[in-house]
Image (cartoon, helix red, strand yellow):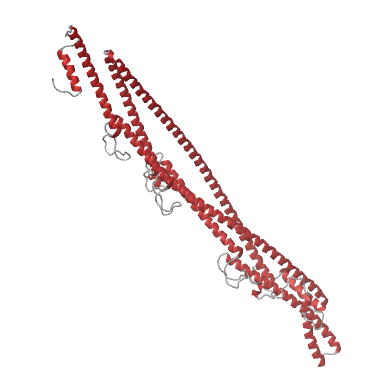
Amino acid sequence: MTTSIDTLALSSSASLNPPDITRLTTKSVEGTGAFDVLMYAVRQHLLEEYEADRITGDEYTKVYLGALQGAMQTAVQFLLNSQQEEKIQAEIALTRQQTVTELAQTDDTIPAGLGFNGDTSVEGIVAIQKEKLALEKDLVDSQVDQSAAEVALTGQKIISELSQTADDFSTALIAGYGLNPSGSLLGTFKTAKEKTLSEIDYTDQRILTEVALTNKSTAETAHITQSTATELQNTGRVASEKLYIDKKILTEAATIDKLVSETSYTDQRTATELVTEDKVIAETAYTVQRTAVELATIAKVESETAYTDQRTATEVVTKNRVIAETDLTEQKIVTELANTSNIKPATLGQITDTTSITGIMFSQRNKLDAEIDYTNQKTATELVTKDHVIAETDKVVAETAYTTQRTVTEVAEENRIIAETSKTNALKSKTDAETIFTEQQTVTELANTSDTKPTDLGVMIGLSSITGLVSVQKEKSEMEVTLLAQKANTELAQTADLVKTGVPYLNGSTTVSGVISKQKDLYAAQTSGFARDAEQKLAKIMADTWNVSATQGVADQNSTNQLYDASLGAVIKKAKEGIGVAGTS
């Protein structure tokens, strides 16, 4: 807050109204004007001298007129000096307040009573400007933090890109990129890589399975051919063979349906790859957009640099103006000094090689001396002095109007600074929010290649583990890796008697068990059954043939029909061994 100018003990009679003649005279012998008071004293002295007969009638008239003129001159000069004193007091007050303003530029407190300020704290426009500068500094600090966060995010993106083509990025970490605790790949990218390897392993195993199925089909085809040849020798078994072939046709149809399903699965994988490609395109567009933002930021920095250069040039101009005003003030001091002295300090003013005061002021002083002599002769010229007082008053009124206008301007400037301060606050809040968002993006990017984060990075301060959607997605990918590994073991069990164990496989033993084991036992039993069936059929054919021949009495053992007892015995023995019957009886 500010206090009244009266605290500087300025004259309370200072006025900005038109000249008041009553200060000179109230048009009465007993008046209170300066002239009236002086004339009252003159009359008292003249009366005393006249009554003591020291002044005669003729001398009284001369002395009275001279005293009248002197009193008028003295009264006018007194009023002029009084007004000049008020002006000087105002200038002193202005100088002291300007000193307060200058001091406020370099200090947070001011001496009590130096200016109009009611206390020692800095207030007003200077205080607001200081607050604005402090906020601008905070804004710059926030922008620096934001830039650092963006640099960290870019470094983490470099690590993410590098992990696409390399298994180790220790060199990049040494170069200052990324926040990973080590150069080994972790996080969602590691899970995705393991998933891809599992898919490759699963696909390779599917290929082996398909090859085995093809070989199985070939063997089954050969077996069917052999069975057909056997059945052609037994016309009574045609119907049974037809049913067997129909069953095989149904089996083949099921195989075709399976192949169609696998084709649909392959089509779905192709669609997934296309979506992945679209994602890569979108991420490329995002990178291009980020590049454009970075270019815009660079342009902004260049613009701010140009603005700083312009401000520097303005400060230089202001400094030159202050120097010029200082020189002008010194010269004004010389001018004021000329009113009361014929000499000046040699270092004061623009002319530093002399101590004498000459020029216009010297001439004006000579002229003033002449005017004083002339005034002593003609009191009437005091009316000119009155006009001078009016002019001085008009000047003070004009200066007051100027001061009022300056006050309006300063209020407007204060409002502008307050508005800019609010804008700076808003920009700082926005920058802080963008910095936090960038840090959180860095955490998201870091989650692609690491399972942990720095405890001071992101919104979740104090936590080093990465959770949330990224963590759930990683768990999902790990489960998919396990599923693919287990599918690969399932496919491996189709063509091998041993499967893989350990992470990411869930099998506790390398021995095949479960449904696949039962199916393999079934297939083995079916294969053995086909062989036993052929043996039984052959034995029956030979036995039936021999029985018919023996019944008709035309049986003949020869090398063509192979119906020797030894040959028949060998077939019967083989059939008995196939069904697990031993012995010769």
Q: In screen coordinates, is 203 left or right of 45? A: left
Question: Where's residue 237, x and y in %?
Answer: 28, 15
Q: Quadrant of residue 250?
A: top left
Residue 17 percent coordinates (x, y): 75, 71
Which quadrant: the C terminus? top left
- Residue at coordinates 39% horizontally, 26% vertically from top-left? 257
| Horizontal arrangement in the rendering, residue 269 relative to residue 390 (left or right) | left
The N terminus lies in quadrant:
bottom right
Give the vertical position of 197 relative to 344 (above or below).
above
- Residue at 26 percent across and 38 percent down: it is 509
Q: In the image, is residue 486 above or below residue 68?
A: above
Residue 115 occupies which quadrant of the picture? bottom right
Instruction: Specify the farthest residue to the front.
Output: 551
In this view of the protein, which residue sits in the foreground, 164 or 348?
164
Q: Quadrant of residue 58?
A: bottom right
Q: Position of residue 98 (x, y in %)?
A: 63, 67
Q: How many discs mark residues in the rendered view? A: 0
- The reply, left or right, for residue 5 in relation to residue 282 is right
